[in-house]
Image (spheres, rainbow, N blue to C red):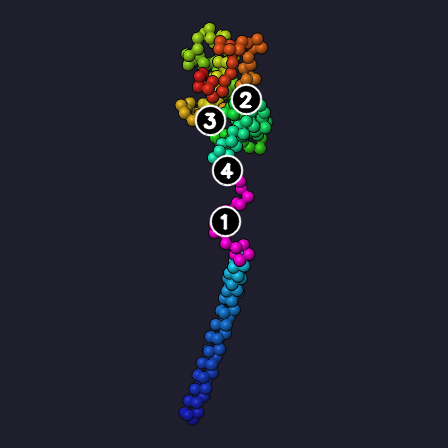
Amino acid sequence: MVSQIKVENEEQTEDTNSNGGSFAEMATHSQAKIQSPERDRKEMRRKFSQGLRKAMGPVEHEPCFQDDPRYTEEELKAKEEQDDVERLDNTLWCRCDYCIPLPSTEESVCCREIPRLKEHFNREITCITQIQDIHNTCLDAKLLDYMVRYRGKVTKDKYTKQYPQIMRKAAYRAFILWIHKFFPLKHCTPIPACIVSLVRKQFPYPPNRMLGLTGLMDYPAIDMALDG
């Protein structure tokens, strides 16, 4: 009887070990199936990369943009001069639709080209001249008149004879203050051609003005502001 029980226990142990082994094999097989797709994807990527390199050939020393033109220093200088000439006697460079032609390339600048002014533009404001604060600050004749008198650099006689030019200078100066909050001694933001147009319309010269050293005449707005 004892021997029979011992034999039955041994048979059960063998069955348990046999089942355990099969369970382990099943788990290993399942894990292999899970890992297999990942290995397949890696292998596909590797073969694709190899095929791409083979088709393109060696690219270690090839330029990224093979069609980009290459200029010498002389060609670049000539190109810059050509770009400057293209800004004269036209407003093709204007992006706000309010600029006017000016006699030099330094003056031929649109407000939308000036990085410091970009924060003011949106769907409704496409030109700096459309901002009401510009009109309140830079075109208010009473405010500009007070600024001129306060500075005390203009005599009464000069103020009377050169009023439009003096007011233009004050308007340009007010625009610089509007941008920088203070008047910088160096690196002033260019005064865009649209602002020049607005100021000239606000303070026009009389039709019978004299031209020359003693008459009313304009020069670059930034210089007029510094001279104001």
N-term mark: 1 or 2: 1
Residue holding disc 1: 62
The residue segment tinted magenta is: 53-72
Q: Main secondary structure of the magenta part?
A: loop
Name the front one of labels 3 and 4. 4
Q: Position of residue 6 (x, y in %)?
A: 42, 89
Secondary structure at numbered mark 1: loop
Of mark 3 and mark 1, the one earlier in the sequence is: 1
> Could you tell which of marks 3 and 4 lies nearer the N-terminus?
4
Q: Is residue 85 magenta?
A: no
In this rendered view, identify the residue nearer to me: 31 or 59: 59
Judging by the rendered image, the residue that carries numbered circle 3 is 189
Residue at the disc numbered 2: 102
Q: Are marks 2 and 4 in contact (CB under 8 Å)?
A: no
Q: Position of residue 22 (x, y in %)?
A: 49, 77
Q: Could you tell me how far apart the alpha carbons at marks 1 and 2 are, in whole angstroms?
A: 44 Å
